[in-house]
Image: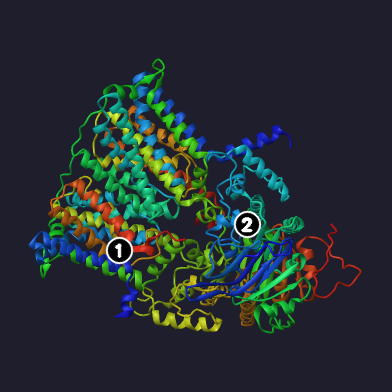
Amino acid sequence: MSIATTTLTDWKLRAGQSQGLLIAVAVFVAMFTLYITNHPAGLTVPVVTTAANKAVLLALVAMAQTLPVLTGGLDLSVGMIFVMTNCLASAIVGGEPWQVALGIVGVLLAGALAGFVNGAIVVYGRLQPIITTLATGAIYYGFALLIRPVPGGNVDGDLADFMTYTVFGETVPTSLLALLAAVLIIWLPFRHSVIGRGCYAIGSAEGAAYMSGVAIGRSKLAAYTLSGLLAGLAGLMLTFVTYSGEASAPIGGTYTLNSIAAVVIGGTSLYGGAGGAIGSIFGAFILRTIDDLLFVFDLPPLWQPLFQGVVLLGAVSLGAARVFRVKNRLELFN
Amino acid sequence: MTDQPTIESPFWQMQGITKRYGGVLALDDVDFTCQRGEIHAVLGENGAGKSTLIKITAGVVAPSAGRLVLEGRDIAFAGPQEADKAGIVCIFQELSLMPDLSVADNICMTAPPGRFGFINPRAQRRRAEALLARVGCADVNPLEQVKNLSLSRRQMVEIAKALGRNPRLLILDEATSALTAGDVEKVYGILRDLRRDGLAILYISHRMHEIAELADTCSVFRNGRHIETFEKGARSDNEIVRLMIGREYTQVYPPKPQREAPPAPALAIKNLSWSNRLNDVSLTVGKGEIVGLGGLDGQGQRELLLALFGVLRGVSGRVEIDGRPARIASPGAAKSERVRMALIPEDRKSEGLLLPMSVRDNIAMASIGRFTTKGLLGGLFIDRARQDAKVDDVIKRLAIKCGDPDSPVGTLSGGNQQKVVIAKWLMTEARVILLNAPTRGIDVGTKQEIYQLLRELADAGTAILFYTTDYDELIGCCDRVSIMYDGAILRELAGDAINEEQIVASALNIDFRPLPAEPEPGSPPCLEARA
Amino acid sequence: MQALLKRVDKPVVIAFGFIVVLLLAGSLYSSSFLSANYLLQQLQVAAFLGLIASGVMLVILLGHIDLSIPWLVTVGGMMSTAAAGWWGPEWAIPFGVFCGLVFGIINGLGVAILRVPSMIFTLGINAVAQGVMVLHTGGFAPQDSATPLMRWLAVDRLVLGIPNAVFIWALLGIAIVVILKRTPLGRYIYAIGNREGATYLSGVNTRLIIVCCFAISGMCSALAGVLLAGYSSKGYQAMGDPYLLPAIAAVVLGGTHILGGRGTYLGTVAGVVLISLLASILSVMQMPEAGRQIIYGGVIVGMLLVYGRGQRVLG
């Protein structure tokens, strides 16, 4: 076999395996174009930065959700870690530059610690992720309330302005760069590390992974900790966007729900073993653009929650199309 | 006191090894040695201790007592990783592959090439390609997801993976059960090469002809004790089986009835097709007949049984029960009064049983509807007493060894578990019974009981269609044998035509012409493919 | 006695034990804690949670989960009061429960036929139910009020001072116990929770059973909403939100395995009482919301860790 044909078959194989991701990207591009062309102001800096900021928040939480899902688990507390780190940031990210830097580190560490606790209970306590994170979510929400019983607080104004605006001569929203940094510094190294691949292995067949020498405990712990870290980063970004902290249960719940939807739309299987954070990012972008489209097409506000709900339901049910193609019903049961 | 390793000292030694699981003695004071450069077969019924032996050798469990000696030095493994580092690699019956990951990822899972905790994808791919070539599967793309490969290919990937760990002692536990004939030959070749290179090889299989082909030494285990070790050819098949089951058995199969006229058809299959796996299959099973489905693995036998039972969608063709056409669109419909069909599925653990539920609940699962209360709220509640009485009856009839029938079925041995699956369907008084490899992984004693039961059911009028890859069973049990090839019935054999040569030849889709010299009795048939 | 003890799950025993501990702790804090009146009041509040937990227990036994509880409760509350306004008071309760039934069936169809994972499908239905309610109320707080019957069922006490709501819970509980222990449906529910594929191959119509259980769960949530509306004399937005975590926690703390196939109703009762007691003690202590949430979550995790192998990941 010549090198050329090998590479061609390889690319065809990879394309086939990344179908979910490619579809998500295509859908997003189509929807965003639709949005921009119908927006009264069009492709201008304020429009794009606002869209980017909101999208990046969900994208980061969706990335956070992806990691435990890959191992076949779930994190129902990501929204609450997001809210908790937002409140924490509104308290400690301020003052002298060194204080700001320390504050940022503190916020990220808090997120990672929350994730680590989740992972530790799942790995060492041997409890199911669903019920574990449902309970720890309440705990993190409690901490958020402790820090911010009422909405308020502050954050370093200059930094917040910088992070929520653009760079490179008003062309690239900074938040997108932050997202890119998260992908380059956290996701890609994880993906290509032994621990990361271990997570995929665990999600695919945990028993087989154990027999193959995968360090189950360490991999899961890493997944949940990094998840907390990403949720913390999202919380930090939220503080930059809103200039304050708010312990809001509805916001936490909404972000958790939307992160799961983003993960599914982006092509990651809820059973684990397949998919990735990049798909989840585009899943998040799609969800955000839907919201924006509703606004642009002047859908009466009363109809919006219903529409969002139906679209969400439809999007996650799309995967159900395979049910009608399956010819051996035994394959429907895992 | 440890010995100095000498050239003659065995590679792996177990001295006085005992293993207890709670109150059960899995291994009882076992002495066992394994030399370099030989293929050592381990034989024994289910429950004989073979898998415990393997697990201790592979470091998965630790012995309760005794000494393990590797190359003359005492050793204890804290886990499978340590055994792996010592060069002991095991290929288990249940594959250790991750279906969603690529072939390359799977092959290099244990010790991936790369530095600082990262994986080098190019190096990984090269290693995978080299190993795939070594097992004769160079046509498999290392980037392909394992779940898209056939079962036989997956097993070959498993073997490639094992070779990649540079084994010094290789253990194969029923590793050829899923392979096509061609791949089996490749594996024989690989094992012979490894033996020549000085590896020690432990080979567990229930297939006598494989053992006869490969093994240099055989060890027989029974009830957790090491019974005997002998050189190749020192004992006949009958003697080996006697060692395994500890009693004389002369007659394996119950006698088949003589029939003058062909019986009335209970199940008539006409032009059944499905996807590209079943092509225009037509077959009849008469009342009281046992018809066997033969042929190589993966020729559509499994799909035929599933199609009959209503599990597959998009099946075309006709099925008639007792002469009347029947539409079977689901297992529920197959179970209905009009049809009364039963299926003993392929994998009892995941398809036939609910392991944490009790033996009684499992046996009653398909027939609960028959045990509802009569009277006012008839049909609403379960009449527990009546159900338990019937269930206990069936347990006695099939001689299921289960202690407390309310204990979970997962605690039973493999043979008894299979009996529970069969019991479940006996409760439905089925008129057609389909069986998918019912004796796979079952000990000899239980197998005999199952053959006896099938013949009893047939004599009482049940029609039985039964798929097995063991041609001894086809010859011994079946009144007629239909060989499948490529999704269609290739040949039907009846009466004296049901013999080893015809079955194997049909399975390979060739014409058999007997060799000029008379083959020696007891040795496997020599077959040359003349396409 | 020995045989009886063997039949009761360890988690159930621990749950009841913890209830006793809570009662003692509460009595230390306030002398009126162990009074009959206060305890009956606790049971009354627990009854609402109990109704919801009963329905979701069936779904969890199947190996699924119902995250649409919050807004199905609200649907029950709001639709019942609305129906009273549109057609008359006798339509209130039936219509409220009927709406829960409809959503429950949709949940079941999505999970059983489309085979969308129940977690995500019920989350989506939750969002859709919210959307429908927002549309219905026009974004304002609903103006309809509860019927006298609803109020009577939720608040009044007919016999021996025992709240009517508790009777309703008891009736539902008896029905569920009978279903689980004495009917084929119950047996099939446990079987599907253990392994749906093997149950299907035994000729059982697993899809129908899944739809049934989600339908029951939807009705239970809606019924709870109806009674809650009766208690507060009207329905209100997001009235079901505080019930999701407690309902699932009650079922799991009662010994039902989150992956399905194992669990008893007695355990669920214990879990419901436990959670309700915990919530009321925390409010008696005037613990701020922050502390309540932390203790809530901590108790759930703590108790599950104590339960041991029964709840843990197998293999």
Give the label, 1 or 2, closer to the camera.
2
Badge 1 element: loop
Disc 1: which chain? C
Badge 2 element: strand
Answer with the quarter of the image where residue B307 lies. bottom right
- Coordinates of residue B52 in the picture (x, y in percent): 57, 68
Residue for point 50% across, 54% down: A206
| Amino acid at dot 1 | Gly
Residue that label 2 marks: B89
Which residue is at the far right? B516
| Amino acid at dot 2 | Val
Which residue is at the far top? A169
Can residue B308 be seen by looking at this rendering? no
Residue for point 15% across, 44% down: C143
In-front residue for pair B530/C82: B530
Q: Residues within 10 Å of mark 2 (few under 14, many from 20)?
A: many
Horizontal side, residue B271 vs residue A285: left or right = right
Q: How is the image coloured?
A: rainbow
Residue that label 1 marks: C254
Horizontal side, residue B160 vs residue B76: left or right = right
From the image, which quarter does the C terminus of chain B lie in?
A: bottom right
| Disc 1 from disc 2: Cα separation | 44 Å
In-front residue for pair A217/C219: A217
Residue for point 30% across, 61% down: C253
Residue for point 32% across, 41% down: A81
Mark 1–mark 2 contact, CB under 8 Å?
A: no
Can residue A250 be seen by looking at this rendering? yes
C84 up-or-down from B294: above or below: above
Give the label on residue C82, or none: none
From the image, which quarter does the N terminus of chain B lie in?
A: bottom right
Same chain for marks 1 and 2? no
